[in-house]
Amino acid sequence: MYGKHALMEALAEGALPTGTQAKVIRKVFLAADMRDGELQALLKKHAIATATLAAGKDKELVGRDAAHQGVIALMDPSALFVPFDDFVASLDLKKNPAIAILGEVQDPHNVGAIIRSAAAFGLAGVFIPEHNQAPITGAVVKASSGMVFRVPLVSIGNVNTTLKTLKEKGFWVYGLAMMGTTTLGTEAFDAPSVFVIGNEGAGVREKTLAACDVTLSIPMHRRTESLNAAVSAAVVFYEWSRKHPEAL
């Protein structure tokens, strides 16, 4: 993870449960001329180990082009995830919350952008499969503007099995699809909702789409065939939030 903003977001009050900061952020490398007293005080407060960022170490850790601002952190992404059962038990289903499930989204920038949109529009959490899916990386953290530390993330195995369990608990499942049979804007979203965002090229897998209660399409001008996966997710999340202003 790289950049001062991302690290400050991780260490901010309420971003992570108390006591977990050092589990998520394992070690921080700081440029020799780093004089940020606030950042250093937060690192000391949470007992996070630091080291001087030696010449050439930045390229070894994050590559040549990453704009790290003299701040690079080693993190354990697994420590960000909330157990599925604990997360579902924490939800008040009477308030009709919404969840996003990523289905083989490969671009880390899309993953980060979707997480950021989920935070912006009041979704309860983002589910991320263990396989065939871009994991949480420094690029995802940066693209999310640090929102990976603000929105509950849940690691899941099989997407279809997860959908079956959620449907049994009363969730209504929506698959985002270019040729969806229901046009966004006509749904009331008056039940707990799950939004499935598929692969950038292939979309939601056929079997997963068959498991959805509704396939949603976004109305758009005829000159445009489709939208980017992250943009589509943001549009749908926004429409859901209009029906649930209490989530904002």
Image (cartoon, helix red, strand yellow):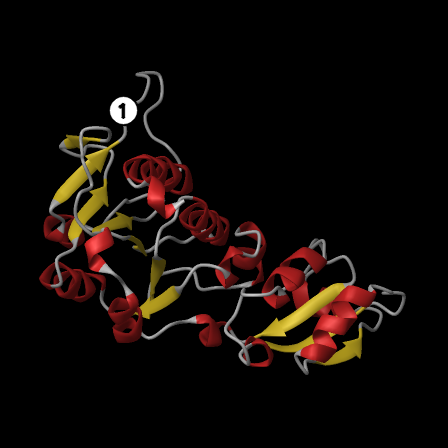
Please determine whether, in this image, residue 99 is positioned above or below residue 23: above
Mark 1 Cα-neighbour bin, 10 Å: few <14, some 14–19, many ≥20? few
Against 152, residue 181 (above or below) is: above
The residue that label 1 is drawn on is 219
Which residue is more in the foreground, 236 or 223?
236
**Residue 157 on image: x %, y %:** 26, 70
Q: Is residue 79 left or right of residue 155?
A: right
Q: Name which residue lies at 79% across and 62% down.
A: 70
Q: Amino acid at mark 1?
A: Pro
Image side of residue 55 versus residue 9, left or right: right
Q: Quadrant of the C terminus?
A: top left
Q: How many marks?
A: 1
61 on left or right of 40 = left
Residue nearest the observer in this picture, 37 or 84:
37
The quadrant where residue 15 appears: bottom right
Q: Position of residue 9 (x, y in %)?
A: 61, 60
Q: Position of residue 98 (x, y in %)?
A: 28, 51
Q: Is residue 130 visible?
A: no
Instruction: Find numbered disc 1 in the image and state the secondary structure of the residue it sits on.
Output: loop
Answer above or below: position of 246 versus 38: above
Quarter of image, res 239? top left
